[in-house]
Image: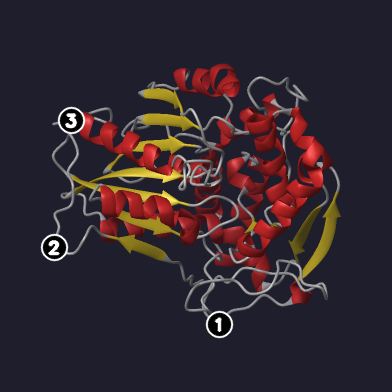
Amino acid sequence: MEWDMGVMVYDPTPHADISRGADGKKIGIFLLHGGAGDFKTMETVSLLFAEKFGCRVVSMTFPGRLYFDDKNRDWPGDTIDTGGTIRTPLWKKGEYVSQDDFTVKEDRSKLIKYGTRTVIHAKKGTRFFDRMASWPAAFEAGMKEACRRYFPENEFSIYVHGHSTGGPYVSMLSQRVANIAGVMAVENSPFGYINEQKHLWSGSIGKIEGFQRLAEKGKSWSNPFYELYIRTWRDLARYKGSEALGQEGPQALMRLPWLMEEILEQWKTARKRPNFKAEYVVTHNIVASLEAAARTSARRLKLNRTETAALVDRFTGYARPLEGPGVKPVPPFLFGISKDSRDHSPEVYREVILPLFKAMNPRPKFALTRFGAGVHSYWTPEKDLPFGIAPAVAQFYYDAITGGFYGGR
């Protein structure tokens, strides 16, 4: 099965030398966007590292997310148009998912956080179903190839960052590419098994510092691998509400109509990004679904029992660190969190994430910094901060790379 995937490469000003880290090697920055986006979501961050700090940046788009049919890569229309047609992935140039290849369902099980969720289920026997089963392995291969092609091991040390949903994927990648030197984990969800516990801690609702949790016990997610979540304006609202609470306090509710106008206006731009999501199987450590995806792929490939078992181990291993003799240890993680982040509160780091990193064997180097401003999408403009806290974030990680946090000579 062939796949078309996109990467955008940003180099420093032509003819400028690429900056070097404390280890003497060229600095390579590998970026992944979050659950709604593509490479354009991360463009502010990419340009900061390339143009201000002289790094080579590779910004990759998840499989199926790049809109090949437009030179600007902007998706047309809405995710669910007025006639009910639903936006679907483009796994390969010229290959389209028929509206007959799936069923549509409404999920009201997570109303407090998401409102009503629209999901589609790929029908068994369709190419869409096979793609949904096998894209995680294709993504792993694509990320490795991007690193090999643009960051030669003898020249570069790579520093990876996955915003939000991208975090568990760069966490997985960090042990599978030899010259990845560390993780720039700002608003970056960790390995899937830790991210699962993070969400269970708050009932999958999150928390804003200074306010009580609405829930203290959640339920593990069980999404099947063939389920695709279709995002809408509600996904802007679930961030806007909690961020307004942190920035304005409860009185933000007094301007609810205005907040809604802001959300709907923002959606006119946001809907140009893909805004569909299948990554929960890894990000929420849904082991049964990962195994089912592996077995589905194995049947399509006509693998024998031994090969099938190996593929199952590969898929179920995406959500946690690799272990055993000869395995590359988890590299250093430098966590960063924004002031008004719902899913990345100081409390969940103290109580869940950092203790689970301490329990790893061998224990990796890690540290946590909280910024005094910013929201989850940390490049979002705020008063007197036209690029949010993104410039401060880029400076922080550049200083860590050149100052030896991730290692030196």
* Left or right: 150, with 185 as reference point: left
Q: How far apart are marks 3 and 2 (CA)?
A: 26 Å
Picture coordinates of residue 44, whole percent (x, y): 42, 53
Q: Looking at numbered disc 3 in the image, what kind of residue is underneath it?
A: Gly
Mark 1 lies on residue: 94
Q: Looking at numbered disc 1 in the image, what kind of residue is underneath it?
A: Gly
- Identify the mark nearer the N-term, 1 or 2: 2
Q: What residue lies at 35% left-to-right and 41% top-to-bottom?
A: 394
Q: In this view, does 351 lie above or below 26?
A: above
* Left or right: 59, with 82 as reference point: left
Q: What residue lies at 51% left-to-right and 36% top-to-bottom?
A: 191
* Left or right: 148, with 6 as reference point: left
Q: What residue lies at 57% left-to-right and 60% top-to-bottom?
A: 134
Picture disc at residue 15 = 2
* Left or right: 389, with 65 as reference point: left
Mark 3 lies on residue: 408
Q: How far apart are marks 1 and 2 (CA)?
A: 37 Å
